[in-house]
Amino acid sequence: MVTTDLFGIHEGKEVFLCTLTNKAGNVIKLTSYGARITWIEIPDKYGTKDNITFGYDTFEETREGDKYFGSVVGRYANRIAGGKFSIDGIEYNTPKNNGPNTLHGGPEGWHSVVWETEIMESSKAPSVKFSYVSPDREMGFPGTVKVSVTYTWTDDNEIIMDYSYSADKKTVVNVTNHAYFNLHGAGKGDILDHEVTMKAPSFTPVDPEMIPTGEIRPVSGTPFDFRTPHTIGERIGMNDEQLGLGKGYDHNFVLDNREEVAVTVFDPVTGRVLEVITDQPGMQLYTGNFLDGSQKGYGGTVYKFRTGLCLESGHYPDSPNNPDFPSTIIKPGETVRTRTIYKFSVR
Ligand code: GAL
């Protein structure tokens, strides 16, 4: 079942809050502002339900609060070095909103626009499609891009995210979802005890500006080796150059098993499990290193340092400037479809 409420008005447009309830009686909420996931309420191993993602009670707080909680990020998720890149010899400049770099599509990227809302009545499970037309040169990017994301909340507690985009000029696109997870329940302590397994044989090390150096480095023998389960906290404090640069984990992992489970997160306290399945080549693991307690979400809950982690499936950061990385170029006439699934269960 899907119910829709008016959440607020942004720049004259209605912003909706959609509540999706599956047959198991579990609820997620989505808003058309930034096509965000704002609420994921699922049981723990004792059957106790809790919301495990970050968000705010009101639209105004959502708009004024952290830019990326639960949002779709685009046109280009993560960083573009120096706020510039070239396609066919033409240089494009994008706003520098993260030191010298462009972060997450620029200050008014897709996280901050109102998407069209469509309830997918024909879907068996509750499903909502958000669509947006991004004009030519929006945030400096070439071409008009038509993008949509369809969220389906299955009876098996999976959030299926189906993205689709096309452009009328050659351009670059990299979309992701920026939900923060705390499997204890959002606001209930940090995520250092969350146990992560990630089928990533290598990662892309960064320079001091958080831009990939171009190297694909094997994880073997490093604190980035999650091929067997490790808690986040186990090695995050190690004296390691890359952990120092990221202030913790804030790195793109190179996946080798597309469309299977790429990452498993297990909370030993509640037994909650999150699996991420994706067809994308990369996965940014970000451990909330920039959370500083300044954001107050639901019921005044304070989101402190490392109390949430993000698993951002997508292309590698700064691919437009790295010809050796998988290409993010999209040509006119092409439609790219990609799928990422967040699957919740208990152990
Ligand atoms: C992540 C990024 C971090 C930080 C965060 C937003 O995707 O990797 O460096 O910018 O978003 O606070």
Image: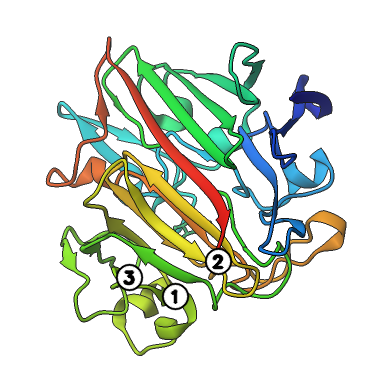
Query: What residue is shown with label 2?
Result: 288
Q: CA distance from mark 3 to mark 1?
A: 14 Å
**What is the x, y in percent for residue 182?**
62, 63
Check disc 3 and report its element: helix, strand or loop. loop
| Colour logic | rainbow
Disc 3 versus disc 1: nearer the observer: 3
Identify the residue at image location x=71%, y=63%: 185
Compare residues 80 and 336 and report the one nearer the observer. 336
Q: Which residue is mark 3?
A: 226
Q: Amino acid at mark 3?
A: Phe
Q: Is residue 176 above or below residue 262?
A: above
Q: Is mark 1 within 8 Å of ligand 1?
A: no
Q: Looking at the picture, does residue 297 appear above or below residue 120? A: below
Mark positioned earlier in the residue sequence (3 or 1): 3
The reply to whether residue 176 is visible in this rendering is: no
Q: Residue furthest right?
A: 299
In what quadrant of the picture does the N terminus appear? top right
Q: CA distance from mark 3 to mark 2?
A: 18 Å
Label 2 vs 1, first from the N-terminus = 1
Q: Are marks 2 and 1 in contact (CB under 8 Å)?
A: yes
Identified at 57% across, 30% down, the residue is 151
Using the image, determine if residue 315 lies above or below residue 1. Answer: below
Query: Which labelled disc corresponds to residue 248?
Result: 1
Q: Is residue 306 left or right of residue 80?
A: right
For label 2, count other residues whose C-alpha is less than 10 Å away and answer few (under 14), some (14-19) or many (20+).
Answer: many
Question: At numbered mark 2, what does the secondary structure look like: helix, strand or loop?
Answer: loop
Task: Single out the residue that lies furthest toward the left.
Answer: 324
